[in-house]
């Protein structure tokens, strides 16, 4: 998920900067940037569902966890996640290739999804897939959370492990809620443009920060700070830096300076 979010942020930031500098860019480059951004954006909730299922197996089926969650199967699941994310939206490119002339891909446009994939059927298809994907992910998160909750109450041992897994599922739900902002942002942006007609670029910039940057900025902090080893090293690093700052700021008297002896 970290690699996926890094790709998503790199592509969207590049696209955002290019849109500010050149305003209009080539349609072919725009297609590439938009498709990669869409793939990685859709990838995030599917990743969350997979991670929730892994936690469910670890708590509710602990004896089978090492048999089910092998490295080979993990690679298979990652490939399946990418296939599920890519398959619905790659059809946008095929439909555009079939309906638009070759000269269209040599034109320059302001790089928005609706300016490149203009067929109205594609917009309806995107909305349908968004509803299906997020409904499935939401049901998976609710199911795994409830099963882990019941398992935590039934177990007399490993309660801390079950509680941590339950908190992880809750974090997945919060992250999913933040990711869902990307699907209501177009409607919110239209309303804001009507209220502030001369602030289009500022609205897009604020929308980008809140919808795309904030969720992916919080997730590594949340998961990193919750890791015991990382938290231990972080505390040690902060304490060492604090001690260094104190040593630098405390003034020394002449009497405190020891003579150098050979």
Image: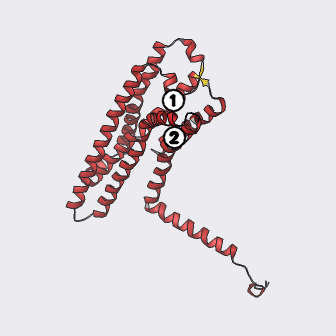
Tell me, yes or no, if residue 133 can be seen here.
yes
| Residue 137 drawn at (x, y percent) | 32, 40
| Residue 113 drawn at (x, y percent) | 49, 27
State how far apart marks 2 and 1 are (Cα).
17 Å
| Residue 126 drawn at (x, y percent) | 39, 28
Q: Which of the two residues, 257 or 40, is positioned nearer the viewer here?
A: 40
Where disc 2 sits, the SS reads: helix
Task: Residue under label 1, please give it.
Answer: 34
Q: Residues within 10 Å of mark 2 (few under 14, many from 20)?
A: some
Q: Is the image coloured rainbow, by chain, by secondary structure, or in one colour?
A: secondary structure
* Callout in the foreground (2, 1): 2
Please give the name of the residue rendered at 28% of the width and 47% of the height, measured from the top-left corner.
142
Tag shown at residue 207:
2
State which quarter of the image contains the N terminus: top left
Which corner quadrant of the image does residue 200 belong to? top right
Relative horizontal placement of residue 233, taking residue 162 as reference (left or right): right
| Up/down of 4 relative to 123, above or below | below
| Up/down of 251 relative to 163, above or below | below
Q: Residues within 10 Å of mark 1 (few under 14, many from 20)?
A: some
Marks 2,1: beta carbons within 8 A: no
Please give the name of the residue rendered at 44% of the width and 19% of the height, measured from the top-left corner.
119
């Amino acid at each position: 998920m970290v690699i996926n979010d890094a790709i998503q942020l790199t592509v969207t930031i590049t696209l955002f900067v290019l849109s500010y500098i050149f305003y209009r860019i080539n349609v072919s480059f725009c297609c590439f940037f938009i498709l990669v951004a869409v793939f990685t954006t859709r990838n995030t909730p599917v990743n969350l569902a997979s991670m929730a299922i892994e936690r469910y197996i670890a708590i509710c089926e602990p004896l089978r966890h090492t048999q089910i969650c092998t490295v080979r199967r993990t690679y298979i699941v990652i490939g399946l996640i990418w296939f599920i994310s890519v398959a619905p939206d790659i059809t946008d490119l095929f439909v555009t290739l079939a309906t638009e002339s070759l000269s269209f891909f040599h034109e320059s446009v302001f790089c928005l999804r609706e300016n490149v994939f203009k067929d109205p059927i594609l917009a309806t298809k995107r909305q349908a897939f968004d509803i299906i994907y997020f409904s499935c992910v939401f049901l998976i998160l609710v199911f795994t959370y409830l099963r882990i909750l019941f398992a935590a109450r039934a177990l007399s041992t490993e309660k801390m492990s079950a509680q941590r897994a339950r908190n992880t599922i809750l974090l997945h739900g919060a992250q999913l809620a933040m990711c869902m902002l990307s699907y209501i942002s177009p409607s919110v942006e239209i309303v804001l443009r009507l209220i502030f007609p001369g602030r289009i670029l500022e609205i897009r910039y604020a929308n980008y920060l809140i919808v795309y940057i904030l969720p992916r900025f919080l997730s590594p902090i949340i998961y990193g700070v919750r890791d015991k080893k990382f938290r231990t090293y972080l505390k040690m690093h902060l304490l060492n830096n604090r001690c260094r700052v104190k040593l630098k700021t405390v003034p020394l008297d002449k009497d405190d300076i020891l003579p150098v002896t050979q």
